[in-house]
Amino acid sequence: MPRDHSDHRADDAGGETTAAGLADDQLYRGLAATERRRVLYSLLSVGPADAQQLATVLAGWRASDSGRLVTAEQREELLTELVHVHLPLLEETGLVVRERASSDIAVGPLDPAVRQLVRDSIAAEE
């Protein structure tokens, strides 16, 4: 299946990196964890956010799933996991980018089919 190259960005070496598409193996590695799919969905829905804001979103999602409040300690554990596991993997796979001028994280260049896959995966959770 041909890839849509209309959404692209330059890599750090000045070359061109194309949008993550459905044929990319790294995509599925990035989408393997519920937390990462939820981060992507949040960024697609609301726009760039920092790690603190994303941890709050994930804590709210967890509370909604369990029907119980998330403690401050549990939120901090989510933040630690986000910063040390999920965000680095999402960056490595090109699904998110960290804005250099701020600490905000934004969705990387994604093929429209990938954007829909993320939305559909969240809808399937409900």
Image (cartoon, rainbow, N blue to C red):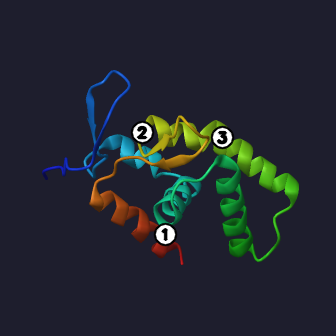
Most foreground residue, 60 or 100: 100
Q: Mark 2 and mark 3: span between their CA atoms?
A: 15 Å
Residue at screen point 55% across, 36% down: 101
Residue at screen point 26% across, 26% down: 15
| Dot label at residue 122 | 1
Q: Tell me the kind of residue under disc 1.
A: Ile
* Disc on the earlier residue, 2 or 1: 2
Q: Dot 2 corresponds to which residue?
A: 93
Q: Secondary structure at mark 2?
A: loop
Q: Dot 3 corresponds to which residue?
A: 83
Q: Assess disc 3: are there few (<14), some (14-19) or many (≥20) residues with their C-alpha within 10 Å of its C-alpha.
A: some
Q: Quadrant of residue 114?
A: bottom left
Q: Mark 2 and mark 1: span between their CA atoms?
A: 19 Å
Query: x, y (%) of residue 94?
Result: 40, 40
Q: Tell me the kind of residue under disc 3.
A: Val
| Dot label at residue 86 | none
* Disc on the earlier residue, 2 or 3: 3
Q: Nearer the viewer, mark 3 or mark 1?
A: 3
Query: x, y (%) of residue 44?
Result: 46, 61
